[in-house]
Image (cartoon, rainbow, N blue to C red):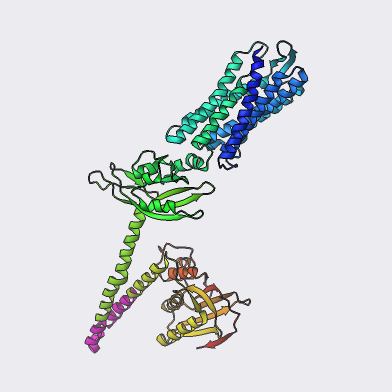
């Protein structure tokens, strides 16, 4: 009996093994069919099965047409394997540079092209120049290799060598299961390559007697199948570790549904001062972090949970990277013990796996900045305000004591009083800014017409020199706005009066509801010199730095308007002055009729 007699059954077993491994993997593991690892593995196993069984049929055929037909199937299987293997291996190695839409055809296209040439060889003779049937113990064909076959062999060995090199290179810097996964895929890729070399080395002058390459693919699929089931090669957990986790500068920990740590990156291991915790239970890894254990156990199936933890490490003096991307020293310089660092840990589930991912973000510097800002704001709102109020009170007493004798210093007293009033206004604005800068606003329902009417009546009483004209609706105009909305009206009117150039400023205040009743416009026009470009940029929100203007009034107007769901516009007419228009959505009101009531 010839060697081919024994090889035939072995090929059938090898093909069946590849198909069974593929079925077992898809049935046992929860995998995403869209990832390059999965697409590559499915193509590899399917192509190997077709290649192996077609080659078994070819060895058993006795006529040249039958052998040629089965050999066409061999070429199709070879093309599928050649296109799938680089995708699978490079994805496992994390070499995403070749897995783009434009580069992928460069590694997957040539094998399919050579397969097409092999199937259509009779038309061009690029793969085999001469094909003849030789009878013996078994019927086989003799061929004269063409330039296409030589090019295919050279290309295949070059690409496989590069892929295997990338797999070896990717093992550096990895530990635990990630390192084992890549070693397993490397071995799975070496075996068929060695089989091909042996087949060529044993070839006679008329061509290779037996091609051992298809038979070795059963071993390849078994090895990759073990890597998938034992080392979770195609799980979203493994994909996350190999392609995302390892590249993040923030500490990341992935915990499986059974409470086992499945993946970490170097930043997490440095943070907790431990070796690779992969495979350990979270109870052991986070035994001193009960808040983390509670967050992991109580993680919702969708959405995220955040918990704040303080980590105190004992390590050499060094540096770390903050959440803002700045390098900062973490050692306190006493005995090499690091100062405590504060982190937020976002706990989020990985869909369809039962696992959760923990991403730690260093907020030490941010927390310190917030505390400094709180201290400064408290000092500004209370200590400084109280001192200014005392100064203002003593100025009033001093003016009363001096009486008519104070004519020489009357102007000085007026300046001091104006300055202290301005400083008190700044402290009030700072307190208001603190309440609206970050926190969610306290929302209330207001009648725009009533708010504006009351403010205008106060202005008329406090500033009799101001010519104030109002156009307000008689009916209610309700809006839902931030509780600080009345201060917007105050600031707009006070700014218009304060910066007026005339002795008797002229203000026009109107509230107009859109014809469809959906929005209301609050418009305030003055006859002053007009806003400067820098002031207008702050008012409408184009500049949020406050570097070009002093005071918080304009910024507060914009901020509170935005929190109230409104928009703001500012125009400077050619004739001078400024027209500021605030637009708000009406809260369920019909369009009211407006009446003019000049005062």
Closer to the camera, 362 or 230? 230
Q: Which quarter of the picture shows residue 424?
A: bottom left
Magenta stretch, overall SS: helix
Q: Which residues are magenta?
A: 395-422
Residue 131 in view in this figure: yes
- Residue 359 in the image, given as x and y percentages of width and height: 43, 49
- Residue 236 in the image, given as x and y percentages of width and height: 52, 43
400 drawn magenta: yes
Above-or-below relation of 221 to 511: above
Please tell me which residue is depicted at 40% across the width and 43% down the height of the picture. Answer: 281
- Residue 426 in the image, given as x and y percentages of width and height: 35, 72
242 drawn magenta: no
Q: Is residue 420 left or right of residue 226?
A: left
Above-or-below relation of 218 to 263: above
Quarter containing the N terminus: top right
Above-or-below relation of 466 to 286: below
Please tell me which residue is depicted at 59% across the width and 26% down the height of the picture. Answer: 218
């Amino acid at each position: 009996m010839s060697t081919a007699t024994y090889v035939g059954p072995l090929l059938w077993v090898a093909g069946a093994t590849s198909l069974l491994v593929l079925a077992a993997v898809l049935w046992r593991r929860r995998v995403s069919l869209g990832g390059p690892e999965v697409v590559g593995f499915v193509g590899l196993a399917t192509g190997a099965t077709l290649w192996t069984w077609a080659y078994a049929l070819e060895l058993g055929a006795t006529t040249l047409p039958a052998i040629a037909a089965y050999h066409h199937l061999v070429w199709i299987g070879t093309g599928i394997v050649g296109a799938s293997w680089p995708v699978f291996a490079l994805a496992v190695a994390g070499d995403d540079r070749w897995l783009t839409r434009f580069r992928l055809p460069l590694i997957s296209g040539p094998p399919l092209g050579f397969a097409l040439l092999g199937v259509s060889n009779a038309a061009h003779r690029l793969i085999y120049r001469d094909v003849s049937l030789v009878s013996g113990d078994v019927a086989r064909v003799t061929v004269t290799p063409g330039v296409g076959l030589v090019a295919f062999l050279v290309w295949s060995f070059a690409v496989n060598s590069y892929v295997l090199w990338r797999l070896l290179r990717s093992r550096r810097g990895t530990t635990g299961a990630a390192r084992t996964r890549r070693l397993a895929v490397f071995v799975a890729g070496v075996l068929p390559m060695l089989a091909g070399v042996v087949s060529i080395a044993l070839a006679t002058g008329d061509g290779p007697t037996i091609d051992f390459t298809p038979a070795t693919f059963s071993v390849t699929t078994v090895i990759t199948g073990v890597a998938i089931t034992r080392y979770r090669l195609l799980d979203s957990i493994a994909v996350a570790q190999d392609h995302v986790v390892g590249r993040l500068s923030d500490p990341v920990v992935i915990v499986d549904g059974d409470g086992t740590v499945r993946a970490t990156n170097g930043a997490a291991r440095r943070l907790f001062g431990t070796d690779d915790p992969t495979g350990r239970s979270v109870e052991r890894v986070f035994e001193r972090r009960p808040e983390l254990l509670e967050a992991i156990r109580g993680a919702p199936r969708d959405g995220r949970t955040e918990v704040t933890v303080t980590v105190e490490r004992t390590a050499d003096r060094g540096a770390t990277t903050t959440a803002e991307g700045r390098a900062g020293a973490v050692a306190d310089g006493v005995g090499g013990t690091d100062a405590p660092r504060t982190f937020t840990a976002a706990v989020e589930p990985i869909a369809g796996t039962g696992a959760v991912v923990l991403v730690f973000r260093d907020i030490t510097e941010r927390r310190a900045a917030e505390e400094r800002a709180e201290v400064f704001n408290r000092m500004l709102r209370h200590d400084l305000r109280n001192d200014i109020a005392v100064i203002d009170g003593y100025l009033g007493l001093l003016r009363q004591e001096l009486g008519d004798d104070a004519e020489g210093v009357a102007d000085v007293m007026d300046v001091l009083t104006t300055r202290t009033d301005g400083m008190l206004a700044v402290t009030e604005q700072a307190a208001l800014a603190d309440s609206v800068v970050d926190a969610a606003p306290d929302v209330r329902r207001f009648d725009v017409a009533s708010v504006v009417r009351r403010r205008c009546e106060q202005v008329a009483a406090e500033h009799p020199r101001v010519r104030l004209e109002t156009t307000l609706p008689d009916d209610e105009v309700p809006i839902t706005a931030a509780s600080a909305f009345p201060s917007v009206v105050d600031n707009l009117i006070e700014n218009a009066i304060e910066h007026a150039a005339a002795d008797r400023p002229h203000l026009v205040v109107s509230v107009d509801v859109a014809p469809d009743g959906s929005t209301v416009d609050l418009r305030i026009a003055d006859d002053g010199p007009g806003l400067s470009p820098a002031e207008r940029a702050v008012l409408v929100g184009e500049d949020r730095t406050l570097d070009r203007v002093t005071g918080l009034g304009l910024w507060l107007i914009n901020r509170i308007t935005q929190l109230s769901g409104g928009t703001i516009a500012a125009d400077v007419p050619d004739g001078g002055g400024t027209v500021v228009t605030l637009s708000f959505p009406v809260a369920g009101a019909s369009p009211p009729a407006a009446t003019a009531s000049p005062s």
